[in-house]
Image: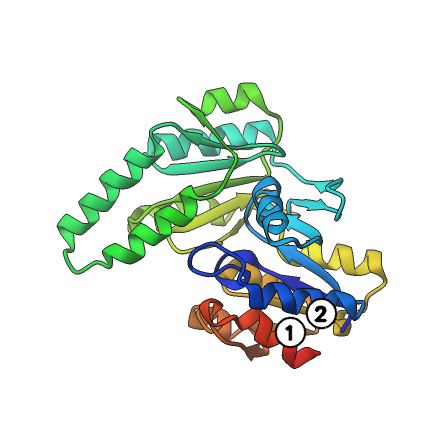
Amino acid sequence: MKLIAIDMDGTLLSSQNKIPHENIEAIRKAQKKGIEVVISTGRSYPDASKLMKEAGLVTWIIGANGATIHDPSGTCVQAVSLSREQAEEILAYFEGRSFYYEVFSEQSIFSPNNGHELVKVEMDRILTANPHADREEMKEAAERQFSQEPFRFVTSYKEILQETNQFFNLLAFSYDEEKLQEAWDRYAGRRDLALTASASHVFDIMHPDVSKGNAVRKLADQFGVKTEETMAIGDNFNDISMFEAAGRSVAMGNAPEGVKEKAGAVTLANDEFGVAHAIRQLL
């Protein structure tokens, strides 16, 4: 194996949004053996880069579900954006339907300044209607979303359109499954867009050429690595394109069944250091 592509949330990261020491050591051992390790995440590059620096790791980083690629020095070698017109139409819809949303650009994650309140109000409404809903899971999902950085808060999506021309990933978050499905159905048939789900209660909209799989293929070609010499590790539906681009695909133990079914193997859960386990088996 010459290239390993690794997702972050639910995969490399623990449920506390940290990279465990066991995973750090396994990655370092792989790198010492000459294996190119690539982080492939739905997070923005600045956020992913910060986590990697804190762990003392230096790798290529595929960010925003494949919209961006940065080399180990931090140089951007790919940036694929939605158009301003596409972003304006989608964000107007998100705002009109009271979604918590995020817009990934090169340096910032734009988000509504009333975003926390939107999420809290929706959580309270869902729990009132269904007292048996998993409150802790809902809180963890929100905390994971809010833990990302650097945020740039705005009063309206119109401010975003004034401040950037980069719309790498438009993310919508909601606990209301019907509302989320309605939004997904609205955009799923569009050939000028790509949709994926990077976490629970979330879906992402990108340029149609964007996917983790396409970004992994691009880097494999650049490194002269064959498909059968590539391994991908992930836990969610946005990782399936990466599985399809790799000769060996590994789903996390905490992955949904639909994701496990698409993988060639299943490792331990993220809190059981499943990434380290998969790499050790490989080495």
Q: Earlier in the sequence, mark 1 or mark 2?
A: 2
- Snapshot quadrant of residue 73: top right
The reply, left or right, for residue 61 in relation to residue 143 is: right
Front-lying residue, 70 or 258: 70
- Could you tell me the amino acid type at mark 1? Ile
User: CA gap, disc 1 to disc 2?
Assistant: 9 Å
Q: Which amino acid does label 2 sit on?
A: Lys
Q: Residue 29 carries which label?
A: 2
Number of the label disc, if any, that sits on residue 240 = none
Q: Quadrant of the N terminus?
A: bottom right
- Residue depicted at x 30% and y 49%: 175
Farthest residue in the right direction? 224
Q: In this view, does 188 lie above or below 97?
A: below
**Which residue is rendered at x = 49% and y = 46% of the image?**
204
Residue indicated by mark 1: 279
Q: Nearer the viewer, residue 152 or 175?
A: 152
Q: Residue sitting at 19 percent across and 44 percent down? A: 124
Dot 1 and dot 2 residues touching (CB under 8 Å): yes
Q: Is mark 2 on a helix, strand or loop?
A: helix
Image position of 106 with respect to 144: above or below: above
Left or right of 234: which side holds 92?
A: left
Colour scheme of the picture: rainbow
Residue 186 visible, this angle: no
